[in-house]
Amino acid sequence: MAEAVIAAENWPHVTEILRDAGLVSTEWMTEEDRDRGTAVHLAIKYLLEGTLDRDSLDPTVAPRIAQFERFLLDVKPKILAVEQRVSHPMYRYQGTLDLDAIINRRRGITDVKGTTASDWHGLQTAAYLEARRLEAAGLVARWNLYLHDDRYQFVERTNRLDWPAFLAANSLKQWRQSCKTS
């Protein structure tokens, strides 16, 4: 098992695969957006662990954490894992899924996002779900949680083509890599 973990560290991340396949555009994303996203994810982790220092929250992060708390109250998920590193040994990719949870008696993964929904988010959740299924039985659902300053949006991903599309993107990335080395 240790060999698989070491090997996985060198495998591409899910978002890298999707970006290299031309499915993710970051041209409109600023460094501030990236930093806020990282801070929101970290604050959610601390909140769920019970160690969040609210006084230290950046003013741009606090409203999104308030919306996450509203989501917790409204939806009442049973959180099983937070910021879980996953990898798929057959397809050789890795990533970090945000939440493994039971919601309405269905176990699934939730990926937390900023305000803008995009089709590639379905491919990302499909990749995380398939990697996590190798370790955790019973996963059936995929969701995105979009956090705005004044509301949240909880979206279930149901497109059955998301997983094959991700596999195609992953194959394309591997093929391009092999062309560079041959």
Image (cartoon, rainbow, N blue to C red):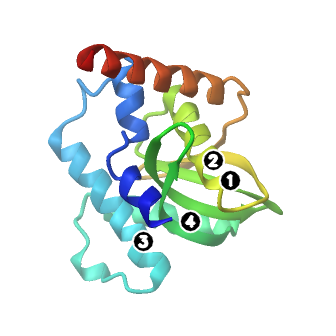
Query: CB under 8 Å between callouts 4 and 1?
Result: no
Q: Secondary structure at mark 1?
A: helix
- Please give left or right for residue 122 compared with residue 94 in the image: right
Q: Is residue 89 above or below residue 118?
A: below
Quadrant of the image occupied by residue 79: bottom right
Query: CB under 8 Å between callouts 1 and 2?
Result: yes
User: Which residue was labeled with disc 3?
Assistant: 45
Q: Amino acid at mark 4?
A: Arg
For this rendering, which residue is in front, 88 or 49? 88
Q: Position of residue 95 (x, y in %)?
A: 43, 49
Q: Position of residue 157 (x, y in %)?
A: 67, 37
Which residue is at 27% across, 28% downward? Answer: 26
User: Which residue was labeled with disc 4?
Assistant: 70
Q: Secondary structure at mark 2?
A: helix
User: Which residue was labeled with disc 2?
Assistant: 129
Query: CB under 8 Å between callouts 3 and 4?
Result: no
Which residue is at 68% across, 67% downward? Answer: 77
Q: Secondary structure at mark 4?
A: helix
Q: Amino acid at mark 2?
A: Leu
Q: Position of residue 62 (x, y in %)?
A: 33, 65
Quadrant of the image occupied by residue 63: bottom left
Q: Residues within 10 Å of mark 2 (few under 14, many from 20)?
A: many
Q: Secondary structure at mark 3?
A: helix
Q: Nearer the viewer, mark 3 or mark 4?
A: 3
Which residue is at 61% across, 54% downward? Answer: 132
**Looking at the rendered structure, which numbered label has been put on residue 133?**
1
Q: Nearer the viewer, mark 3 or mark 1?
A: 1
Q: Is residue 143 above or below residue 72?
A: above
Q: Residues within 10 Å of mark 4 (few under 14, many from 20)?
A: some
